[in-house]
Image (spheres, grey):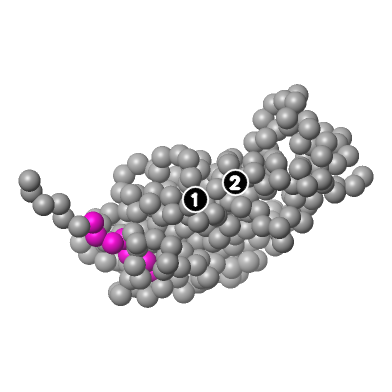
Amino acid sequence: MTYTASPTTLAMLTALLEARTGQQLAANRAWRLDIALKPILRDHDLASLDALVETMMVGDVPLLADRIVDALVNSESSFFRDAPVFDLILEACAAVEAAGRRPRLWSAGCATGQEPLSLAMLFAERSAPGALMPEIVATDVSETALARAREGRYTQFEVQRGLPIGRLMRWFDGRDDEWTASPELTRAVQFRRCNLVADHVPPGRFDLVLCRNVLLYFAPAAKAEVFARLATALRPGGLLVLGAGETVIGQTQLFAPSRRFRGLYEKVAEPARRAA
């Protein structure tokens, strides 16, 4: 079998991904199409990406477009990614608790769940008497990724990325080459599907939103729309956590670098309206 594709097929697949998720597939990342879609080609005994798109357009296979989008979405993740960020999150949530509120956190683009489960571990391990688990909401556009996150099941390779042996043995049950997160962790997270460019944000206001490395491949207009949605979801003065190589500078005026929590971004206060 060959998995090469015509320019028209490549254009249709990249347009489908952007329309459904906001993500753009740059020309230098087109190689991902072959790798990501190979299982779907196998399952349907299709010889090429051209045949896959033709089958999708005819509509003979229900939900085929959904499965293609699921396969193309980047679900790369790891436990305690960029570890120093989690110290800042603890500090920011302590300030919320000092104000008498239970913190609310949203992991936007949680992929297979490593980030929100890292948050659950982080707060469960606190020794402060009477400390409560924050409310943790985790969302992703991929139902396939969310199904794995809800199960909390990971391979040996996945748990080795960011989990020291002490945490692994405390919070996971290992059998053969698979590790399952403790129910205490999975119950601490509310997993929901959310398309950041199309769906309503989770209800209520959050103190902190993590949206790390999610917007890297978004078009500028889609990225601006997502920033607006994230700002709406945050309380006044709420904090946004982006990936190490991301910034709001030059992309939105709704957030500014936080002076107190270096590396995080604070929601800019809306100007007060004058009385008529």
As drawn, which residue projects farthest toward the right? 1
Quadrant in which the N terminus is drawn? top right
Q: In this view, which residue lies farthest toward the left?
A: 276
* Camera sees residue 256: yes
What segment carries the magenta color? 264-270
Classify residue 266 as left or right of residue 16. Answer: left
Is 258 or 112 nearer to us in this picture? 258
Sort mark 2 into few (<14), some (14-19) or many (20+) by Cα contacts within 10 Å: some
Q: Mark 2 sits on what residue?
A: 18
Give left or right: position of 34 versus 205.
right
Amino acid carrying label 1: it is Ala
Q: CA distance from mark 2 to mark 1?
A: 9 Å
Q: Which residue is mark 1?
A: 222
Q: Are marks 2 and 1 in contact (CB under 8 Å)?
A: yes
Q: How many marks?
A: 2
Q: Position of residue 33 (x, y in %)?
A: 75, 50
Q: Report x, y in % for residue 88.
A: 39, 71
For badge 2, the amino acid type reads Glu
Inspect the magenta stretch and tell me whether residue 9 lies in it: no
Q: Secondary structure at mark 1?
A: helix
- 203 vs 77: above or below: above
Taking depth in this image into account, of 146 and 13 the one nearest to the observer is 13
Helix, strand or loop at label 2? It is helix
